[in-house]
Image (cartoon, helix red, strand yellow):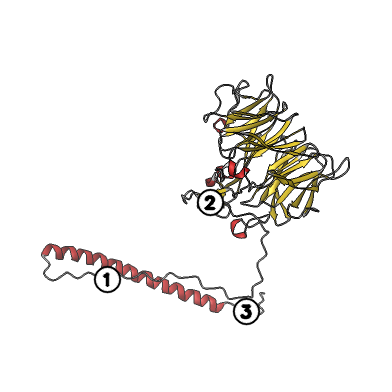
Amino acid sequence: VRGNGSFAAVAWNAGSGGQVAVLPHSLKGTRIKHDIPRVQVGSAPLDFEFSPFDDCLMSTASDDGMVKLWRLPQEGLTENLKDPVAVLGGHEKKATFATFHPCADGVIASCSWDLTLRLWDVQQGEKQRVNLSDQAFHVAWSPNGESIAVTTKDKQLVVMDPRQPSSAVSMDIHEGARATKLCWIGDNRILTTGSSKGASGEREMAMWDVRQPGPALKSLAIDQGSGALHAWYDEGTSLLFVAGKGDGNIRYYEVEDTQFHALSAFQTTEPQKGVDFVPKRYMDLGKKEVMRALKVESNALVVIPFKHPRKSEAFQADIYPPCFAGVPSIPSPEWLNGKNAPPAYKSMDPASGAGTQARAAVVAASPSAAAQPAAPQPAAPPPAQPAQQPAAPAVAPPPVAPTPVAPPAGANDAEKTRLAEENKKLQAELANTKAQLEAAQKDVQKVKAEMEAMPKPGCACSTM
């Protein structure tokens, strides 16, 4: 499953040939008909992805070795879509992944069982080819678009600038036989999921620094489940979400430097066939939604919002720092020729009216403390306090007495009569004020008498 702000795409097994159902979010809560219009890929789709810059543009990679681009109507499909807007052919075996560049529009990377990673310009075709040591299990761009990472069947994590294949570095990762997946944590760290060695090896995740290839910075055993684990990282809140195929839960952690702090998990009894998360810029700020998952079950597509428990209706800047704006930051020819540009970010505050801005490089696993919510902590017991006399209850100050109004010189009879009536009312208010003042003074005297009758601190008192 893949999702964005307009659609959710799900592989559809009905009929002959590969098909992908693209469902508008307006269908939420309705029963989907079996014969809904679909994208006719022509061969079994092994991967599909929405463009980060255009909700209506989708790529597919299929087992016929083809990478195709599809233009979707804004209102959703009303008939089967059979004609792609672009076909990128060249892989000799199954195309298993196709992913858009996060900063340059029109650049795609793909992987295949022909053991190659290929870089494409959608207008001009193949631009670069990189040989891999084994089949790719996962591929993902770094947030700044300068590097791409691949996990392979021979238990390697390969990181490179695909424009310069000689820049590739490799690291030995999980020793188990389960498929390995990855997600970037900032621009320089990668989290991988896999399993430990042995037939009953535990599922685990580990963090790596691409600037210092070597042992993992941190590893964490999770459980002995059988499905591959997928991970998603939200740099705005430093939250890491982990879900396994066939599991019924979605775990989430807080990432602090190289540490994983388990927070909680969304749990159901219905196993998931696939999970994806909607881009951050589409969150419902009024409901304090920080992430939104799409979960495919046996007969349903479920929307799962993750919310921060805050009651204030004001904009929450600490959980909504600037996020990816969904616009390219560099033309594809410039990027292909060796230039780089950070991704374009925008404020999430609806009242800001600010445009996009270049994102500062993320050099650590988590953003600054000022841009992230504090992790939940157990409440500390209050410190012991010495015995004290109980304070006297606060007594409201007496109301200010109104001042009678004197008639101005030369006033006529009608004016004098009106002022006399007004003075009469003020005199009544003055009498009422005096009565309130006397009652307040009696309350003060009563409290003082009660305090004087109480035992002094430190005195031993006994009753018979």
What is the spatial separation of the Cα atoms under label 3 and label 2, in whole angstroms? Answer: 63 Å
- Residue 357: assigned label: 2
What is the spatial separation of the Cα atoms under label 1 and label 3, in whole angstroms? Answer: 47 Å
**Residue 51: x percent and y percent?**
60, 37
Q: Report the residue that reaches farthest toward the right.
A: 198
> Is residue 102 something that shows in the picture?
no
- Residue 57: assigned label: none
Q: Report the residue that reaches farthest toward the front.
A: 337
**Residue 359: x percent and y percent?**
58, 52
Q: Who's the residue at 78% across and 39% down the image?
A: 132
**Kind of residue sitting beneath label 1:** Thr
Q: Who's the residue at 66% across and 61% down the image?
A: 379
- Residue 403: assigned label: 1
**Kind of residue sitting beneath label 3:** Pro
351 vs 129, left or right, is: left
Label 2 sits on a secondary structure element that is strand
42 vs 453, left or right, is: right
Per the image, the residue denoted by label 3 is: 457
Neighbor class of circle 2 (other Cα within 10 Å; few <14, some 14-19, many 20+) is some
Mark with earlier residue (1, 3): 1
Q: Who's the residue at 59% across and 59% down the image?
A: 370
Front residue of this view, candidates 120 and 27: 120
| Residue depth check, mark 1 versus mark 3: number of the one nearer the observer | 1
With respect to residue 268, does 376 lie above or below?
below
| Residue depth check, mark 2 versus mark 1: number of the one nearer the observer | 2
